């Protein structure tokens, strides 16, 4: 009997702090309290509730290690949160932190743009990114056939798309806030 191959579950290694409260009860796990950190995972871009090590402090936008081995400031990742359940200050910080993630992981997003495919016969994944309509999409597809985009600046120069970081960040924000039916970047 053949067994289905289940790839190992991928866990987030890093998250970016959106907000923290030194004395708070967890929303996701009953009975847990202490330093509650709201963060966004670097890889899956999901909102997380994290229990911090007592007496540690966190800065908004700080990249923290949340992987399995060798955590220093994190006791545990309590669970995923949805946009509506995070504090208003975390909601306020989110856009800037998402832009920081896009900037610090630029190659990942450039690779996405270089390899994005049609989702249906009528809709291409690229068109779902704000600011990219049919015209920019066609130009991008033609240009990447000649030569893959090296970075977002290269893309901007070659097809004239203004602020690709902002457009990608805007799409990620729409996915996080639940305004989209289909996700390109945020893992459910």
Image (tube, helix red, strand yellow):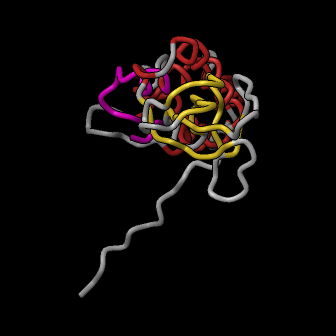
Indicate left or right for 162 with 134 as reference.
right
Q: Where's the C terminus, which quadrant?
A: top left
Question: Of residues 115 and 31, which is closer to you in this image?
Answer: 31
Residue 176: image location, x then y, percent: 44, 26
Decide: is 38 above or below 167: below
- Residue at 60 percent of width and 25 percent of height: 98
The verdict on residue 181 being magenta is yes
Indicate left or right for 40 with 80 as reference.
right
Question: Of residues 170 and 88, which is closer to you in this image?
Answer: 88
Question: Of residues 25 and 145, which is closer to you in this image?
Answer: 25
- Would you identify the image quadrant in which residue 124 lies? top left
- Would you identify the image quadrant in which residue 30 lies? top left
| Residue 23 in sight here | yes
| Residue 20 in sight here | no
- Residue at 54 percent of width and 33 percent of height: 33
Decide: is 79 above or below 22: below
Decide: is 145 above or below 56: below
- Residue at 39 percent of width and 34 percent of height: 183
Residue farthest along the left direction in this orientation: 1
Residue 54: image location, x then y, percent: 71, 37
Start-end of magenta stretch = 172-188
- Residue at 57 percent of width and 43 percent of height: 43
Q: What is the tally of numbered marks visible in this picture?
A: 0
Q: Where's the N terminus, which quadrant?
A: bottom left
Residue farthest along the front direction in this orientation: 31
Residue 99: image location, x then y, percent: 64, 23
The verdict on residue 180 being magenta is yes
Decide: is 184 above or below 75: above
Residue 109: image location, x then y, percent: 59, 37
* Magenta part, dominant SS: loop
């Amino acid at each position: 009997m053949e067994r289905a191959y289940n790839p190992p579950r991928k866990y987030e290694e890093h998250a970016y702090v959106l907000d923290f409260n030194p004395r708070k009860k967890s929303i996701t796990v009953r009975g847990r309290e202490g330093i509650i950190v709201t963060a966004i995972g670097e890889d899956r871009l999901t909102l997380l509730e994290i229990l911090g090590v007592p007496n540690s402090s966190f800065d908004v936008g700080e990249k923290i290690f949340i992987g399995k081995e060798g955590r220093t400031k994190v006791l545990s990742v309590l669970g995923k949160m949805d946009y509506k359940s995070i504090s208003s200050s975390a909601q306020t910080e989110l856009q800037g932190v998402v832009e920081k993630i896009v900037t610090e992981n630029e190659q990942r997003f450039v690779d996405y743009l270089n390899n994005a495919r049609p989702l249906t016969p009528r809709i291409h994944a690229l068109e779902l990114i704000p600011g990219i309509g049919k015209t920019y999409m066609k130009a991008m597809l033609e240009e990447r056939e000649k030569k893959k985009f090296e970075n977002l600046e290269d893309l901007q120069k070659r097809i004239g798309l203004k602020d690709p970081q902002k457009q990608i960040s805007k799409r990620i924000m729409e996915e996080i806030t639940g305004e989209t039916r289909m996700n390109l970047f945020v893992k459910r």
